[in-house]
Image (tube, rainbow, N blue to C red):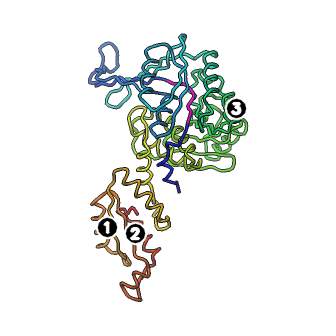
Amino acid sequence: MIDLSLLQNLSSASVLVVGDVMLDRYYNGDSQRISPEAPVPVVKISKIEDKAGGAANVARNIAHLDGKAGLLGIIGDDSAGTSLQQLLAGEQIHSELVSQQHKPTIAKIRVVSRQQQIVRLDQEETFSAEDAKRLAEHFAAVYQQYDVIVFSDYNKGSLQQITGMITLAKAAGKTVLVDPKQTDLSVYAGADVITPNLGEFRAAGGKTGSVEDMLSSARKLMQDAGLASILLTRSEQGMSLITADEHFHFPAQVLEVSDVTGAGDTVIATLAVMLSAGMSLHDATQLANLAAGIVVGKVGAATVSPEELAAKLNKDLFRQGDFYQTPFDKVLQHIRFARQSGERIVFTNGCFDILHAGHVRYLAQAKALGDRLVVGLNSDASVRRLKGEQRPINTLEDRATVLASLASVDW
């Protein structure tokens, strides 16, 4: 089980993000007619909103998870670069952006109407080798200050010296995560985890015809490129964590998709923060999967808070109905997180030896008084004292199993 106490100490996480920073600009408005000039919708703009994108959005996600976030990237000497710097100044992010005059700041401009993207315009040119060298020099000067290094590669030229930077980080004992875009994965040699989506995985030579194909091709790519593990994000199929010896599948957690913009950024940011806070790779991946499910239910390049993660984890807790096997201190942790998430806790108790319709209605009414229902269950010895030597009919474990199957009972 995930150690929920770690979610209360994420400020200890220390993560440096290096890569392609960009500005996400949203033109929001209403569209009610088609243009007479061409068969396209006319959008009457009512709001213009700027957000940090790419590697900057990864750093933003880390900061919103209460982690210490550093950011290195390249911008142009233009208004988009100025806007991005102003955005980052308002976040808890220590950013050092290399400014150059030859290429524009990467910008993605989206026109949105009624929460639907109408069109996206990209402003970008590949950065020069000299600019990438300057970024690597900045990296060499600051990477020792962080526990985990994230490389956010959008293939825009910022990370032309990524192999050397990974080598430097690994020699210092740092954990290295990469959100890849290159088809030659050997440039990421030494990375602890890479997080490709299905398209990136296939482009690099991965096969997805079956689970067996996926696992065998992933392990071949890992061996050939010198990678420790692959976290494959598979859209509505969830995620698959693949190491040399093990694999784990995590089903998708989202109920309704509003916008997938920045979902990959949230995944690698959550993974980095949890690993830096001391969580295992398996548990960190589980939380990254939960975070992705939360963020795609929002519009735009959104973020996730520790409180949202705790609330989502609580909702998924004990889905298999085995709460009686959970240590009491763990249950108290979950109740505490539920209260911190603003949920109202209801408590009741009883023997519940021979469960009947009256019990079910009573528990449903108790649950209606709040958000969470905690049931205290009398021990076998207690039931015997109250009901007589022939009771209980059902053992404590059996009674707990039956109660756990009721939708009204949380703990």
What span is colored magenta in the figure?
15-21
Q: Residues within 10 Å of mark 1 (few under 14, many from 20)?
A: many
Secondary structure state at the residue bearing disc 3: helix
The quadrant in which residue 355 appears is: bottom left
Residue annotated with mark 2 = 403
**Which mark is on residue 383?**
none
Q: Does the stretch in magenta take in 39?
A: no
Q: Is residue 108 visible?
A: no
Position above or below: 233 against 389:
above
Position above or below: 411 against 10:
below
Secondary structure state at the residue bearing disc 2: helix
Task: Give the mark, 1 or 2, whose residue is nearer the N terminus.
Answer: 1
Q: Residues within 10 Å of mark 2 (few under 14, many from 20)?
A: many
The quadrant in which residue 127 appears is: top right
**Which mark is on residue 167?**
3
Q: Residue at x 39, y 24 (%)?
A: 50
- Callout 2 amino acid: Leu
Q: Nearer the viewer, residue 1 or 187?
A: 1
Q: Position of residue 399 (x, y in %)?
A: 42, 74
**Which mark is on residue 363?**
1
